């Protein structure tokens, strides 16, 4: 008991005598209500009521009835007559006085208070009117590169290990069990492993993101970044810190949604999270490249740039709209910001954050991703026409094609109401880059991806995993000098390979579904891909961060926005006599 | 005996996470507060034969329930009645940090003050009278430089004293 008393504070903030008298009166009244006395420290409760806490006031009123409520009002009126309407400010002020007196008693400052600390001197440069913004953009560029180029080789490695050695082992094992070539193999490799891979490929990306976030936050720069960008972002009704998730969004929506954690108010977090998917993520680029090179070979670059710009403009427009509607009652949070002193990040803290936040994503996201993979696999596996057997159906004879045909009328007003397009958009929910693969498959062309399975031994597989990891490390390290502008070794140009015959097939199909306006339909298709529902992993991330309610706003809302925008492009273009 | 709960409270940027990590090591769990988008971190601390759950409250400047973070921190202390609240303060900005302490005093909960960043304060020539602060508030005060691990043993010692006395406390919390 003695220690318990030792640890219960003996001091108390003391207010002016009139306030103390009213507090005492309320405490006595509260003590008569057993429910209150059991649940709350009564003096604290009285202070909260004086500070205008409506939730607690309602509870007290519920417990004590109208008579207690009248007593509280009387108390507050007496105090307000003396201190003015804003009683809460009076209490805060008196608490500060207590704190000031206490600090004066225990703290001695050196004579020269106005010496600039090291931190202040650094800030003279980094939050400087002219240097602040370029430095900020340089930092954003670094974060973007980290989550894309540096994480990239590791993403490929994870992907390679799962699709290479691990699927080989699964297939081998199934062969031993006599299940080779059966639907079990198809399910395990095509759905289960694909789902696992779908989650794990994001681990390097999130590791990189959380590393960058932890370093930016722990070093103290994040607060400066918000300060530097706030004037601009506030005009859009966003917070200075919203900028970082937006930039990360150009790499991948998933880490971008998690990057909204750096925002303090739930309103800013959610609003930013809803806008992030409009930043065109890198997985959508292959779709742009494929479609743009087929339909607009001369201006492909311009079209792609235009799409990125459209995404940004849409984010700004939608952001404004959301603030006028859904967020009408939630004004932007006032910009009060502490600039903490710069510090070297504690590496252990950085590591713990990287690890625990990434693990939390894997735990939370796998259910949605797994379920979606299985559903898509089932749709593709079930034959509805022709002679195909379960798990061996041709794509155009599968339940998937049936479904795609069923939904394709939705896209008819947009000019691409053909089942190949709606099918590709459906699998695009799994991952945006899959749109390309599905298009190739629906037009009966394999994208040259069917690697001739070279039989490997177990030992070769295991050494392969390690050597390819080594290559990934080297590749990632090679990116770092490039980030600061050095280019060691020429970067290979990635040329997108458009298979023979695909271009003509797609062109013919789009021409048919659009009534001869293939170019406009292709543009509408691209705009749709840019804006529609983010992939399942991004959806899982949004659910993880914002709760199940908001993912529907995101899924349905974005689908609607994309549909309208594509409609405007196609029908508007036709009316104007373009294409 | 894992029935003790210790909450960590403090302003943002005072090294609360470093203290939390040092106390719990890798034995921690990150989730969200129920129905909220704010991260909830908790971990286990073993002191002798006892285990305590350390809950890292969101970093806040006050406990007036004006923001989600403040509300979470306040509700946890009031409704869950932790066995102790460890209030981490940045000595280099003591006065501003003490505002939260003043509010914690009003919540009538066993309190331990951790004055972090004594190294930074030293470098700036700030002098702190630890016994005077402890006497003025009637709470244990631990001096710490968490980034260097200084003061962590002292905090653990203070906490084990607390744990030793805990079964006798019968605080009637809901925990």
Image: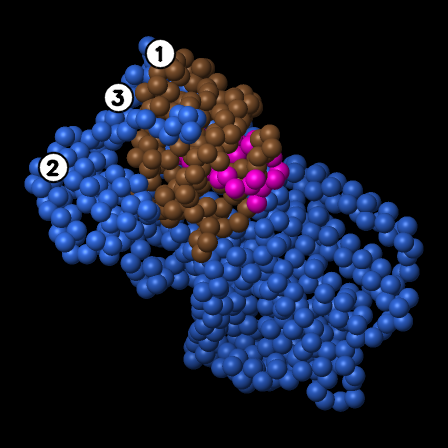
Instruction: Same chain for labels 2 and 3? Say yes or no.
Output: yes
Q: Which residue bears the numbered disc 1?
A: A110
Give how far across and how far down residue B164 sits, in percent.
Answer: 51, 30
Q: CA distance from mark 2 to mark 3?
A: 22 Å
Q: Nearer the viewer, mark 2 or mark 1?
A: 2
Q: Quadrant of residue A381?
A: bottom right
Q: Nearer the viewer, residue A55 or A407?
A: A55
* Mark 3 element type: helix
The residue wearing badge 3 is A101
Where B22 sits versus A79, above or below? above
The reply to whether discs 3 and 1 touch (Cβ–Cβ < 8 Å) is: no
Q: Residue at x 70, y 55 (%)?
A: A494
Label 1: few (<14), some or many (≥20) within 10 Å?
Answer: few
Mark earlier in primary sequence (2, 1): 2
Residue at 52 percent of width and 57 percent of height: A544
Q: Which label is found at residue A248? A: none
**Residue A124 seen anywhere in this rendered image of the structure:** no
* Chain with colour brown in the figure: B
Quarter of the rendering occupied by the N terminus of chain A: top left
Residue A521 is situated, as x and y percent measured from the top left of the image, at 54, 76
Q: Colour of chain A?
A: blue
Q: Which residue is mark 2?
A: A83
Residue B27 is one of the magenta-drawn residues: yes
Subunit bearing disc 2: A
| Relative depth, front residue between A223 and B85 | B85
Calculate the distance from the C-alpha at mark 2 to the C-alpha at mark 1.
37 Å
Decide which of A107, A79 is in the foreground and name it. Answer: A79
Q: Which residues are magenta?
A: B1-29
């Amino acid at each position: 008991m003695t220690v318990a008393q030792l640890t219960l504070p003996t001091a108390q903030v003391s207010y002016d005598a009139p306030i103390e008298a009213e507090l005492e009166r309320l405490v006595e009244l509260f003590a008569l209500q057993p429910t209150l006395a059991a649940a709350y420290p009564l003096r604290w409760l009285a202070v909260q009521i004086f500070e205008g806490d409506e939730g607690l006031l309602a509870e007290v009123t519920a417990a004590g009835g109208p008579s207690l409520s009248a007593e509280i009002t009387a108390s507050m009126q007496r105090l307000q007559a003396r201190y003015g309407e804003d009683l809460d400010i009076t209490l805060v002020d008196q608490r500060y006085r207590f704190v000031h007196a206490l600090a004066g008693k225990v703290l001695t400052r050196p004579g020269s208070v106005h010496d600039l600390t090291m931190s202040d001197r650094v800030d003279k440069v980094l939050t400087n009117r002219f240097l602040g913004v370029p430095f900020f953009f340089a930092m954003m560029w670094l974060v973007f590169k980290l989550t894309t180029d540096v994480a990239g080789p590791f993403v490929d490695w994870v992907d390679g290990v799962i699709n290479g050695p691990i699927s080989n082992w699964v297939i081998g094992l199934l062969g031993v069990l006599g299940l080779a070539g059966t639907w079990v193999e198809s399910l395990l490799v095509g759905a289960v492993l694909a789902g696992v891979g779908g989650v794990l490929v994001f681990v390097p990306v999130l590791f990189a993101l959380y590393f960058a976030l932890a370093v930016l936050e722990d070093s103290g720069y994040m607060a400066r970044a918000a300060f530097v960008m706030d004037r601009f972002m506030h005009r859009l009704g966003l917070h200075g810190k919203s900028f970082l998730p937006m930039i990360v969004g150009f790499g991948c929506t998933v880490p971008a949604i998690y990057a909204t954690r750096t925002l303090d108010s739930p309103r800013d977090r959610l609003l930013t999270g809803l806008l992030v998917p409009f930043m065109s993520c890198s997985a959508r680029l292959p779709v742009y490249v494929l479609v743009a090179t087929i339909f607009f070979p001369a201006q492909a670059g311009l079209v792609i740039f235009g799409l990125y710009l459209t995404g940004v403009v849409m984010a700004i427009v939608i952001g404004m709209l959301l603030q006028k509607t859904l967020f009408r009652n939630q004004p932007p949070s006032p910009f009060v910001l502490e600039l903490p002193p710069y510090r070297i990040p504690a590496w252990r803290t950085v590591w713990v954050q990287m690890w625990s936040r990434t693990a939390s994503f894997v735990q939370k996201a796998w259910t949605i991703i797994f379920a979606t993979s299985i559903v898509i696999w089932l749709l593709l596996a079930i034959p509805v026409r022709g002679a195909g057997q379960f798990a061996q159906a041709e794509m155009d004879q599968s339940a998937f094609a049936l479904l795609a045909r069923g939904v394709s009328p939705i896209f008819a007003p947009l000019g691409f109401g053909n089942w190949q397009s709606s099918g590709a958009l459906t699998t695009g929910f799994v991952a945006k880059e899959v749109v390309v693969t599905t298009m190739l498959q629906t037009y009966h062309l394999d994208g040259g991806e069917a690697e001739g399975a070279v039989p490997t031994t177990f030992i070769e597989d295991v050494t392969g995993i390690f050597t390819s990891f080594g290559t990934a490390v080297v590749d990632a390290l090679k990116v770092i000098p490039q980030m600061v502008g050095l280019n060691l070794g020429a970067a290979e140009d990635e040329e997108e390979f458009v298979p023979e015959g695909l271009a003509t097939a797609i062109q013919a199909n789009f021409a048919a579904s659009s009534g001869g306006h293939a170019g406009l339909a292709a543009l509408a298709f691209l705009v749709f891909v840019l804006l529609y529902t983010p992939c399942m992993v991004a959806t899982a991330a949004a659910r993880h961060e914002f709760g199940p309610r908001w993912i529907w706003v995101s899924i349905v809302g974005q689908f609607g926005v994309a549909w309208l925008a594509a409609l405007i492009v196609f029908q508007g273009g036709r009316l104007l006599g373009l294409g | 005996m894992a029935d003790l709960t210790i909450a960590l409270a403090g302003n943002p940027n005072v090294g609360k996470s470093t203290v939390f990590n040092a106390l719990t090591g890798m034995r921690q769990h990150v989730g969200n507060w129920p129905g909220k988008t704010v991260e909830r971190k908790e971990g286990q601390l073993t002191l002798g034969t006892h285990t305590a759950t350390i809950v890292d409250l969101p970093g806040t400047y006050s406990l007036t329930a004006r923001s989600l973070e403040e509300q979470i921190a306040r509700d946890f202390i009031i409704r869950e009645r932790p066995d102790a609240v460890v209030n981490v303060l940045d000595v280099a900005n003591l006065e501003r940090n003490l505002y939260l302490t003043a509010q914690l005093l009003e919540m009538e909960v066993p309190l331990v003050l951790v004055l972090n960043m004594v190294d930074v304060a030293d470098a700036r020539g700030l002098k702190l009278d630890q016994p005077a602060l402890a006497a003025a508030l009637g709470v244990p005060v631990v001096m710490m430089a968490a980034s260097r691990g200084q003061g962590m043993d002292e905090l653990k010692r203070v906490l084990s004293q607390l744990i030793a006395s805990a079964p006798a406390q019968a605080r009637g919390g809901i925990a």
